[in-house]
Amino acid sequence: MHKLNLLPKEILISQKKKKLGVFCIIAGSLLLILFIIFFTKVDNSIKLYENKIYVANKDISEMRSKLNYYFGQKTLRDFEKRQNFYNAAARDKTNYSAILSDIVNLLPNDINVSSISVNKSNIIKINGFTPGHKHVALLIDDLKTLDGVQEVTLGFTRLISTSDEEGSIGVYDFEISILLVKDRWQ
């Protein structure tokens, strides 16, 4: 048989409203509790990560200060070692560029230099052309006054040409050898 619902329609509607109201209150309360728990967890995790970031930043700052001090000291020691090495190496040495610069500054206008060379036995050779022997002799005297020069010798001179349109002017080829002081080699 069929079960008949003998309750009036108004009572059924009021019971549904009561059930729905209770369900909404329970669901709302449950949602509120879940939101409170969620936001509490998020807030605690934010504080935890902020604390970890603070500790990590503090450690990094300490490491940087130690590394800056270490590398600063290391750089200073390295610079001092290099400076001491350079000073020791340059103390009793002759720098070829300085000697060659002095030689070029001593050359008179009447001498044309074709080459300047340095060989392994620490001899600088100057080859060139000049209109007369006098200029070569003056250059040799000037070269003897340079610091670090032990001996200056004339390798050779030879007459290349003797004719010119206006008269006879000689052009001489020459070679001068400069021996540097032995303990000043570099």
Image: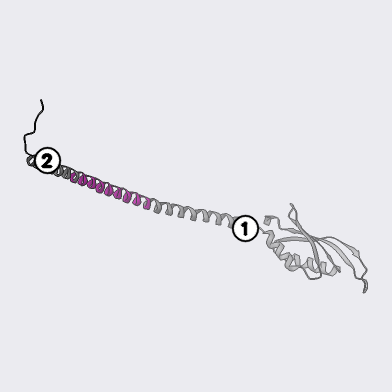
Determine if the magenta segment contains residue 46.
yes
SS state under label 1: helix
Q: Residue furthest toward the bottom?
A: 166
Among numbered discs 1 and 2, the one appearing first in the sequence: 2
User: Real-space Cα distance between discs 1 and 2?
Assistant: 106 Å
Q: Which residue is mark 2?
A: 16
- Image quadrant where one finds the C terminus: bottom right
Magenta segment's dominant SS is: helix
**In front: 22, or 125?**
22
Query: In the rendering, at what x and y percent does residue 85 appear?
Result: 57, 54
Query: In the rendering, at what x and y percent does residue 66 appear?
Result: 40, 52
Q: Quadrant of residue 15?
A: top left
Query: In the rendering, at what x and y percent does residue 7 appear?
Result: 6, 36
Q: Residues within 10 Å of mark 2 (few under 14, many from 20)?
A: few
- Image quadrant where one finds the N terminus: top left
Give, as a single range, the part of the protein colored magenta.
Answer: 32-61
Q: Residue at x 81, y 68 (%)?
A: 111
Q: Which residue is mark 1?
A: 90
